Image (tube, grey):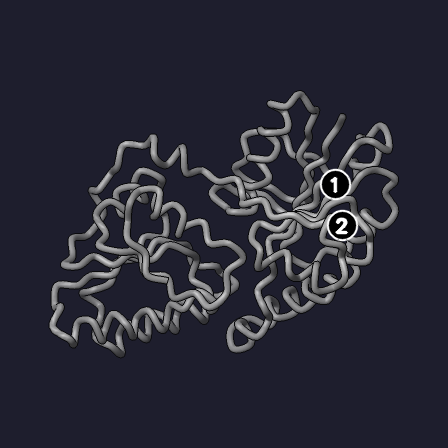
Amino acid sequence: MRFAMLAPGLAPHDAVSNDALGMCAALRAAGHEVSLFAPHARGIAEPVLDPHRIEGWLRSADDCVIYHYCVGWDFALALLRRLRARRIVRYHNITPPGFFADWSPGYVAACQEGRAQLDAFAALGCELYLGDSPYNIEDFTSRGVAAERCAVLPPFHEIDELLALAPDARRIPRGDPLLLMVGRQSPNKGYLELIDALAATVADGLSAARLLLIGKLDPNLASYGAAVQARIAERGMQDHVVWLQDANGAELRAACEHAGMLVMLSRHEGFCVPLVEAMAIGTPVIA
């Protein structure tokens, strides 16, 4: 049996990409033939094929396409409508567009499109809808997809690899306490509120508190990144915040080990792998 793993994009250390790659490995271990398909990919160790080749690659109606649904994508919707093969929608949730209203018209449009397509994907009658959390799968059960066609499968991840790494603490600051936040700088992640919370913590007498931010700044959200930097300055927190955009796995391991807690003020998550990473290492979590 052949499985075509379809995603709108693939990149290293990305939650959706890790899930797709983990699925590929599990299916191959079970004896199936699997290929990855995406319109663009970077830093992926295995071949990634053009999605337009999927229909020619599938051999029979018993083969299967697993589509990782995380943005609006007309191509994927049209493909699943016309395919004569098994279809699985792997749903990672789509951030409500209102979070981006003040920061990125492009993201507002993309999220609106993605959420607008939920009804169409629900109406496809796919063999299976897989959410990576109960919260996610409600987007399909609430649209009338039968419960027997829905299931929850937590995402594949890189936690085993993380635990196998020797921690590298050379760039990890010291703090009393050291607070840690892991995640890209995005409005739904609550970075502005986190800076306010840090300022209140310092004002309450914990003058040695430090906040370590691990996460990349999305170029499409540059205005939000600038707002975070401005909030740091407004609150006088320049000496209390360290931001690592390029932290590797060994540094993430060290950060979790040195942190007094992971603080996650996100207002919307489909799953939130950093919470599980912190728990696996033994870092207390406030979320």
- Where is residue 149 drawn, in percent x and y? 74, 48
Identify which amino acid the numbered label 1 is placed on.
Pro
Picture quadrant of residue 116: bottom right
- Where is residue 94 drawn, in percent x and y? 61, 61
Residue 47 vertical placement versus 143 (above, below): above
- Where is residue 50 drawn, in percent x and y? 72, 38
* Residue name at image x 76 percent, y 35 percent: 64
Which is more toward the observer, 87 or 137? 137
* Residue name at image x 78 percent, y 44 percent: 127
Q: Which mark is residue 76?
A: 2
Q: In the rendered structure, which disc, 1 or 2, sits on the residue that comes first in sequence? A: 1
- Disc 1 versus disc 2: distance between alpha carbons? 9 Å
- Where is residue 130 drawn, in percent x and y? 65, 47
- Whether residue 8 can be seen here: no
* Left or right relative to 65: residue 162: left
- Crowding at dot 1, Cα within 10 Å, few <14 / some 14-19 / many 20+, comes out as many
Identify which amino acid the numbered label 2 is placed on.
Ala
* SS of the residue under disc 1: helix
Q: Which residue is mark 1?
A: 51
> Which one is in front in this view, the residue at disc 1 or the one at disc 2?
2
- Whether residue 248 can be seen here: yes
* Residue name at image x 86 percent, y 29 percent: 60
The N terminus: image quadrant: top right
Dots 1 and 2: beta carbons under 8 Å? yes
Which is more toward the observer, 95 or 46? 95
